[in-house]
Amino acid sequence: MSLLPRERREVAPGAVHVPDWLDADEQRRLVEACRGWARGPSPMRAPRTPGGGRMSVQMVSLGWHWRPYAYSRTGDDGTPVAAFPDWLGDVGRRAVADAYDDPSAGEAYRPDVALVNYYDDAARMGLHQDRDEAASDPVVSLSLGDTCLFRFGGTENRNRPWTDVELESGDLFVFGGPSRYAFHGVTGVRPGSNLVENGLGAGRLNLTLRVSGLVHGGPA
């Protein structure tokens, strides 16, 4: 947590950073939930890319299992994916309402999938678009643990211009509307920067909530 207040900021049209959105108790609840989800039934793992490489983040999915670059109802080992909890959907609706200052937008938000990523000191996430969903509702991103440098670019390609945002423990970032398909990634994590007593310890957890638009493995 920063010593100086950080202001809510619209990074790009439809992309909003809300610092310190989760208090310490809310963070502890999410950290404990993530520990349970990481154990399975389809446990946390480093996803393998179509080219055979391994991503540097560890990931577990809720609601739908994500593999580059598709969703399924079962994990890589054939086990069912963990259910997406109703209470996490409530967190997502509150996030959208607060980020956009629009209660009706929050009420309409119905996420059914979450990706939980764990970053150690060496993990990164290259610039990419979230395009595997069949719906264009906003993406809700929640940060826990060590601070990361989040790079947010345009919708056409990975080139400049982009904006670098420090996401600290408890921060909310929502991107939708004109920025829904913006390229984004994590260029690094600052070890030992977490000053919140949330039970995580080392590393960074990131939860992204999405609306899949999928029914039984295909478009709704």
Image (tube, rainbow, N blue to C red):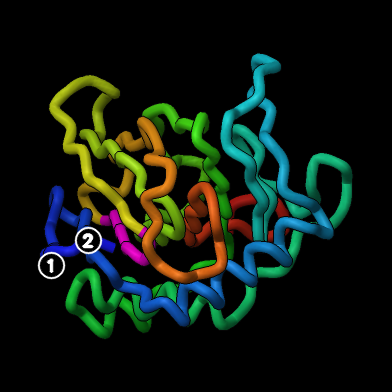
Position of residue 165 in the picture relative to residue 208 (left or right): left
On the image, numbered disc 2 is attached to which residue? 2
- Where is 22 relative to 207, above or below? below
- Res. 174 image quadrant: bottom left
Q: Position of residue 214 (x, y in %)?
A: 60, 57
Q: How many residues crowd around disc 1 within 10 Å: few (fewer than 14), some, or many (20 or more)?
A: few
- Where is 122 relative to 197, above or below? above
Range of residues picked out in magenta: 169-176
Check contact, mark 2 vs mark 1: CB within 8 A.
Answer: yes
Q: Position of residue 195 (x, y in %)?
A: 37, 61
Q: State whether residue 141 appears in this view.
A: no
Residue at point 22% right, 20% down?
159
The tag on residue 180 is none
Position of residue 78 in the picture relative to residue 10 (left or right): right
Residue at point 87% right, 42% down?
77
- Res. 93 image quadrant: bottom left
In the image, residue 55 lies in the stretch drawn in magenta: no
Q: State whether residue 23 appears in this view.
A: yes
Quadrant where the N terminus sits is bottom left
On the image, numbered disc 1 is attached to which residue? 5
Task: Residue lying at the far right in this picture: please name it.
Answer: 78
Helix, strand or loop at label 2? It is loop
Q: CA distance from mark 2 to mark 1?
A: 7 Å
- Where is 151 relative to 95, above or below? above
Residue at point 65% right, 24% down?
54
Residue sitting nearer the eye, 31 or 54: 31
Q: Amino acid at mark 2?
A: Ser
Q: Position of residue 167 (x, y in %)?
A: 30, 52
Residue at point 49% right, 70% down?
198
Q: Amino acid at mark 1?
A: Pro
In the image, residue 175 lies in the stretch drawn in magenta: yes
Q: Position of residue 172 (x, y in %)?
A: 32, 63
